[in-house]
Amino acid sequence: MRRLALNQKTTNRWSVQEAVDGCVRAGLEWIGLWREPVHEAGLATSAQLVADAGLKVSSLCRGGFITALPGPERDAALADNRRAIDEAAALGTDCLVMVVGGLPDGSRNLPGARARVADGIADLVPHAQQAGVRLALEPMHPIYCADRGVLSTLDEALDMASPFPADAVGVVVDTFHVWWDPRVEAAIARAGERIASFQVCDWITPLPPDALLARGMMGDGHIDFQALRRHVEAAGYDGPIEVEIFNADVWAADPDEVVALMRKRYEEHVLD
Amino acid sequence: MRRLALNQKTTNRWSVQEAVDGCVRAGLEWIGLWREPVHEAGLATSAQLVADAGLKVSSLCRGGFITALPGPERDAALADNRRAIDEAAALGTDCLVMVVGGLPDGSRNLPGARARVADGIADLVPHAQQAGVRLALEPMHPIYCADRGVLSTLDEALDMASPFPADAVGVVVDTFHVWWDPRVEAAIARAGERIASFQVCDWITPLPPDALLARGMMGDGHIDFQALRRHVEAAGYDGPIEVEIFNADVWAADPDEVVALMRKRYEEHVLD
């Protein structure tokens, strides 16, 4: 249970204060934060709340969205990513989750968008290294390729990370995004010390109508979490295991009950 | 325009007779048939209707769904696939599209399901060879991995096809299923003479609520059809290009207008 982390998105209605209190009530040691609620609470206040509660921050979500064509929009996105790096450092986590972004409006040039992600990462690495923060590239399920993340496989994320030191650019292994990949075991082994975050949630069917809110609680769907956790551990990762669930029903439920259920399902489906 | 094929599913409410007549009215030379409407019309009658109209059958959809555990359900599925092979031969097409099936109810063993697909293909190949029909393995978009098709990439389909002669086991390149794959260009080149069918439809956002009916008319979404068509042609494929669209709005529209729009969009977005 010491590795279990509540990603704040799972209890979407909770503020930083409420999520911190909820973690303490549930006996958790780790919390994954999101920038929007951190901004609402204030960065320094958020860092203080977490520290006072004795929690550790497993990751900050999220940087990224760097697929825009060169110009003011891209410049603004890169500047915002530099701020996100600084925020991660201020919150005491070295893991900034990067959701790289989809195709620009009207564009069908997927290789072009992917090349701009690679350029953007290169642009951000010096600032990240200076701040002691790792850019954690998150391959997204191909369902999101067009509109959220053009990085579609763990291998692709590793290819993109490979020009940089492992402590500057890592990858996120999120079960929802990678479970289907016939190469997932080999890619996780290849990832090794690049694994910056391990996130869990389930793939449920029928897929909920809103694709963005399609993730399920562990055990409600089709993913073999124990197998994926073993692969990740065999690759050398022993950090926090974050539960991040985008789901309207989960968000509508009582957050304390969601956290209790998360603990139970983690024990039953993720641990041995 | 001589390569354009109407897959019957695009005009879902049309019977075989109506679809054949619609193709003739639109000046098409190819039609892709589905087993259910063929059964309704009768196999011999369907073959006669197509022949009398001077059309060629680009493919029969579909065989597959062979992921069940050993037992009566699996035996029945394999027997049904043998009938599908015979039906393809009777309709004068050498291309039987194989949608391999998802995880059995309650199972989370994805590698196991994939292994049973490989076993099932091996079981079916002799019958297919005898009938002169090629099993065309269709990698499905990972959105369908749990419930429709555990073959998720073109590379995986090619790995599964590789023990068998290319004229016995081929692959389907369907733009909707493969467009996101960072390895798609390399995998299409690798496929070469294994390419048994090239199908086109678009990936649209926001994704419609029913994931099964999420496909769009070419030009309505994010796929670069010309690039994929060029890759397929560079790999040596010069057969029919089938338009297969599962979409409630397309199905609700007047089928003749759908065919007219399909012709127009094919010219604008698929051809050079």
Image (tube, coloured by chain):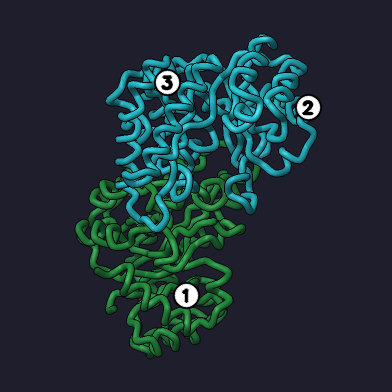
Chain colours: A cyan, B green
Rendered-image quadrant of the N terminus of chain A: top right
Residue B44: x and y in percent read 46, 82
B78 or A196: nearer the viewer: A196
Q: Decide: marks 3, 2 in contact (CB < 8 A)?
A: no
Q: Which residue is mark 3?
A: A134
At x 44%, y 22%, the residue is: A195
Q: Quadrant of residue A58?
A: top right
A27 left or right of B33 in image? right
Q: CA distance from mark 3 to mark 2?
A: 31 Å
Q: CA distance from mark 1 to mark 3?
A: 51 Å
Q: CA distance from mark 2 to mark 1?
A: 51 Å
Sequence-first tag of 3 and 2:
3
Above or below, comparing residue B70 to residue B46 in the picture: above
At x 66%, y 26%, the residue is: A41
Crowd around label 3: few <14 · some 14–19 · many ≥20 (10 Å): many
User: What chain does badge 1 belong to?
Assistant: B
At x 36%, y 27%, the residue is: A124
Rendered-image quadrant of the C terminus of chain A: top right
A140 left or right of B182 in image? right
Q: Which residue is mark 2?
A: A256
Above or below, comparing residue A20 to residue B125 in the picture: above
Q: Which mark is residue B8?
A: 1
Q: Secondary structure at mark 2?
A: helix
Viewer-nearest of labels 2 and 1?
Answer: 2
Kind of residue sitting beneath label 2 = Asp
A175 or A168: nearer the viewer: A168
At x 70%, y 32%, the residue is: A11
Q: Quadrant of residue A183?
A: top left
User: What chain does badge 2 belong to?
Assistant: A
Kind of residue sitting beneath label 1 = Gln
Viewer-nearest of labels 1 and 3?
Answer: 3
Q: Quadrant of residue A182?
A: top left
